[in-house]
Amino acid sequence: MELKGKRVLVVGLGRSGLSAARFLRRQGARVTVSDSRSAEALAKDIPALLDAGIMVEAGGHGLLTFRRQDLIVISPGVPLDTPEVRQVIALGMPVIGELELASRFLSGKVVAITGSNGKTTTTTLVGQVLADGGLTTQVGGNIGLPVVELVEKDTAETWDVLEVSSFQLETVDGFRPKIAAVLNLTPDHLDRHGTFERYAAAKKRITERQTAEDFLVLNGEDKETQMVAAKTKAQIFWFSGRRPIKQGAFVHGESVVWLGAEGGKAEGVMPVAEIPLKGAHNVENVLAAVCIGRLAGVSAASIRETVKAFTAVEHRLEKVATINGVEFYNDSKATNVDATMKALASFPGGVHLILGGKDKDSDYALLGSLISERVKFVYTIGSAAEKIERQLKGVAKIESAGTLAAAVARARERAVPGDVVLLAPACSSFDQFENYEHRGRVFREIVQDRHQ
């Protein structure tokens, strides 16, 4: 992709937008950035951008700014139905995202992992599996480094392990992973995509450009991911925590098993009991990682050692402390209803559940049966609190706490030894926090401060 001298507009100055702008400038492009936030809100970034020769438009998007470009790169946080973006698309102007931009410069083998839940844990685990297996590995995308920041150190021998979201996949065109994985598909981000069908369609674009030389890893127990199989040209490998499958990774008895080819010989990978992560959903994440690791050429023995040593990723069923016999778990990454259901399924009962944040057009009533079985009290926080309380009325004892600090305080007062205080909000964090990481850190600080 030749960028020297080209006029390129980057829309949205989040983490990936800033990285894309700097990358484009290093490639010799004439770069402008546009963000709806005010110059005051962008004050920490604007000086460095101007010093790099990048023009800045703040406080809104100008249609003329958009029309004067040879290429437009939009950040994941910018919806495609933003009026100016919609107009230039209608005019036939090229519009791509940071993931697509970076993919045109990556020379290594790409592993791309998506799904409604489990992406970060699986991506992190796969990165460690490949690195421990002796492969040169980089990890980034929707976690860690933006993909364009992986380009500089990338070589033909590198494995680039990427977590990719529906927002990123909306704007791919030529993106072609050597190994793609769709872990599961349940309703999420409906406030952005409008319908589950549109959300799922964005996720399924991960395999759009794959060929028969590539691999696609799918969840054999998830109906929506099974539908992806009919639309791919890639070789399909399945994973299942419930039954043997013809090709892929599965649980048989008490062991994780890998079957590399239909009709081939199965090999034991490890006992399920050696998986240190809590919850059946994390067994599925390990199975997906086994598929990817074996397809990349890592031995079963090496994968076993990596999984045994792997600890929960920050903000994902992360045990924060045990205080007076009460366990505190941070699952701030549970930003949708399905993730919260998986978290609740990891505990037999005695749960004090903290729910709430910014609603994503979710149906919290789906939590009803698990809450009635396993939850002692629900504490609501954030702007979604009223909706959650309305939809869960009569299911459990609910207290409107308002803030995270108040919710933890109420839970501590009521919890007895053997109980669990669980932050698994089923909402995004943007009403009270910068992001889910910020929310998780605050929860951890509140718990640990009280512990001290």
Image (cartoon, rainbow, N blue to C red):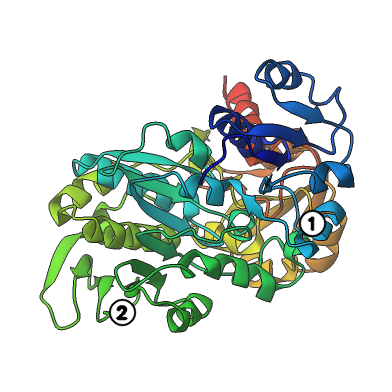
Three-letter amino acid code at the position of disc 1: Val
Residue 101 picture location, percent across and down: 55, 47
Q: Is residue 437 visible?
A: no
The type of residue carrying mark 2 is Arg
Residue ID at (41%, 41%): 139
- Under circle 1, the secondary element is helix
Q: Quadrant of residue 80?
A: bottom right
Residue 397 visible? The answer is yes
Q: Is residue 220 left or right of residue 135?
A: right
Vertical arrangement, residue 376 with respect to residue 15, above or below: below
The residue identified by callout 1 is 88
For label 1, count other residues whose C-alpha is less than 10 Å away and answer few (under 14), some (14-19) or many (20+). some
Determine the secondary structure under disc 2.
loop
For the image shown, how many numbered marks are present on the structure? Answer: 2
Would you name the residue on which mark 2 appears? 243
Between the residue at mark 2 and the residue at mark 1, the CA separation in whole angstroms equals 49 Å
Residue in the image at 83% along x and 26% along y: 41
Q: Nearer the viewer, mark 2 or mark 1?
A: 1
Residue 291 placement, left or right of 89: left
Q: Are marks 2 and 1 in contact (CB under 8 Å)?
A: no
First-in-chain label (2 vs 1): 1
Image: 328 above or below 187: above
Residue 9 numbered mark, or none = none
